[in-house]
Image (cartoon, rainbow, N blue to C red):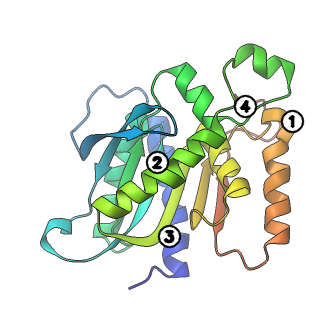
Amino acid sequence: MKPSLSHVRAALVLVLLVWGAYSLGQNQSNSISIGQTVQIKSAILNQSRSLTISKPEGYDDSPDRYPVLYLLDGESNFEFTAAIVQFLAENDRIPGMIVVGIHSGDPPQRTHDLTPPSQVEIENRFSPGNGGADAFLAFISGELVPYIDKNYRTRPYRILVGHSFGGLFAIHALATQPTLFNAYIAIDPTAGWNNGTEIVRVHRVLSELKDLQADLFISAANDLGSATA
């Protein structure tokens, strides 16, 4: 059965739980093993990237196909996100999903991958090496998504989730490839990056593409008047 609009909204509600778990989970030292870590060689990025992938309950015992949730910063966000997805699916709140955690690597690599170029001097000073978002998006669209579709039983329904710079990347992805995902979830995004250029781009895309079948959900952990990193 194709995921319905109610499923989309349920998946967006998931973000609130994920964000709460993220905030609580940063100081936890205990973890459990959930999912399988694999390596994918990227010709676009000229390097191997790590993924952690979880399959929904019953995946190996049925021929069913599943939506895919692509999660940025997978090394820190994967376990609780996959657990929340599994919990909500088991309680019929959302459809079962394949969760793909995309590892960011070290901080300079993360900054490079998740940010569009900036013309702001202070951003270039404190976030050097930024500007690789287009190449990273090309890797996701041209290599990662085809890899997952080839090796797992997927439905043509994808969700992208990112936090902070990852949220900025989700907004950039919607502005750049608005049909790649069916839902774009930006948790506390660094929306002011490059003087808010990506927000302006998304507004233009959403205004011009009236028939776009995609949802954008943005949550903010800070007061609108507060500075965010």
Q: Which residue is identified by label 2? A: 71
Identify residue type, mark 4. Thr
Q: Secondary structure at mark 2?
A: strand
The residue where tag 4 is placed is 228
Mark 1 lies on residue? 195
Q: Quadrant of the N terminus?
A: bottom left
The residues bearing labels 1 and 2 have C-alpha atoms spaced at a distance of 25 Å
Alpha carbon distance from label 4 to label 2? 21 Å
Q: Secondary structure at mark 1?
A: helix
Residue found at x 30% / y 25%: 29
Labels 1, 3: front one: 1
182 vs 192: above or below: below
Residue at the limit of the structure toward the top, as seen here = 125
Q: CA distance from mark 4 to mark 1?
A: 13 Å
Q: Position of residue 161 (x, y in %)?
A: 53, 51
Occupied quadrant, residue 21: top left
Pick the front one: 227 or 8 = 8
Where does the image place residue 151, in percent across and percent down from the top left?
28, 59
Q: Are marks 4 and 2 in contact (CB under 8 Å)?
A: no
The mark lying in front, picked from 4 and 1, is: 1
Provide the secondary structure element on which disc 3 rests.
helix
Q: Is residue 132 found left or right of 35 in the rendered image?
A: right
**65 horizontally vs 94: left or right:** left
Q: Is residue 198 visible?
A: yes
Amino acid type indicated by mark 1 = Asn
